[in-house]
Image (cartoon, rainbow, N blue to C red):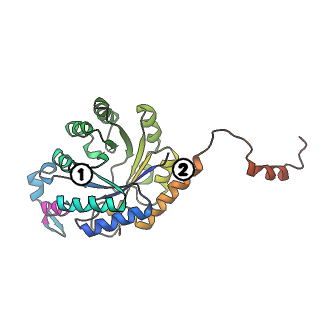
Amino acid sequence: MSTFVIAEIGINHNGDIDLAKKMIDVSVDAGADAVKFQKRDINVVYSKEFLESHRESPWGKKQKDQKLGLEFDESQYKIINDYCKNKKIEWFASAWDLNSLNFLSKFDLKFNKVASAMIVDLNLLDSIAKQGKYTFISTGMSSYENIENAIKIFKKHNCNFELMQCVSAYPFDDSMANLNMIKIMREKYNCKVGYSGHEKGGLAISVAAVALGATSIERHITLDRTMYGSDQAASLTPDGFKSLVTAIKKVERAIKGDNEKKILKIEESVAKKLREHIKL
């Protein structure tokens, strides 16, 4: 089975629909299976005090200005929806609150995503699971108890899900990836386990995750790591993302086999030549 590759656009579009389109184009060109965004009702996710606090950004001098600047409205998501249909690529988004989940329900999306931050919001998880859509659940900042509480909800509603090993730092050092959790969670919870990566750069950890059995790979994508935004530094450039997809396909071919050790046809002539001097 092929690894499901997700290009995480997130909020790297910086509120620019044309930039979002370019990132979708890049994702399609690289061979991604889906692109993913993030959706928040900022008045629910953030306190009024926080929104009124100071923050310099391209949109103004308050946190509210920056948060609003990064959010697409319904008309913009309709453009994204139509654009992705035209480009024949799936899109979905992680809803950070019930209002955002209801907003996304306006579109005929195949998938849901639980962001690591939201895995402890049991009311939100219950509403997501009730929709019955295949759901990717990131497990950054999570304990076994948090994960098990989420699994109970999805099983209660017979909603198919996939866990994703994740470290919620942007970026994090390679030594913190803890890829062994892919196998551990797969065996512990008898479910598919993918990998959502925020490492410093490069492809090695994500490719290793595939070799260890990750059924999905999610990486942030950007057109330029120097652009404004907290996620840009942990994102792959277009060339990097294309190289990732190529490497994943190569690993998939390399780990396929019939689980039997035998002399292959292509080895027979080599064996004859190199073992000619041995009396068997």
| Residue 67 counted in the magenta span | yes
Query: In terms of secondary structure, where does tag 2 sit?
Result: helix
The image position of residue 202, as x and y in percent, is: 46, 60
Outermost residue toward the front in this view: 86
The image position of residue 243, as x and y in percent, is: 48, 62
Residue that appears at 46% across and 45% down:
214
Query: In terms of secondary structure, where does tag 1 sit?
Result: loop
Q: What residue type is labelled 1?
A: Phe
Q: Name the residue under label 2.
A: 252
Residue 114 vs 186, above or below: the answer is below
Contact flag, marks 1 and 2 (Cβ < 8 Å) = no
Residue 249 vs residue 4: left or right?
A: right
Residue 208 appears in the figure: yes
Q: Which of pointers 1 and 2 indicates the residue nearer the eye?
A: 1
The one nearer the camera, 228 or 132, is 132
Looking at marks 1 and 2 on the same chain, the residue that comes earlier in the sequence is marked by 1
Q: Which amino acid does label 2 sit on?
A: Glu
- For marks 1 and 2, give the CA distance: 33 Å
| Residue range of the region highlighted in magenta in the rendering | 61-69
Q: On residue 138, which mark appears?
A: none
Q: Dot 1, how many residues are within 10 Å of its Cα: few (below 14), some (14-19), or many (20+)?
A: few
Q: Name the residue under label 1.
A: 107
| Residue 183 counted in the magenta span | no
The image position of residue 148, as x and y in percent, is: 33, 32
The one nearer the camera, 87 or 191, is 87
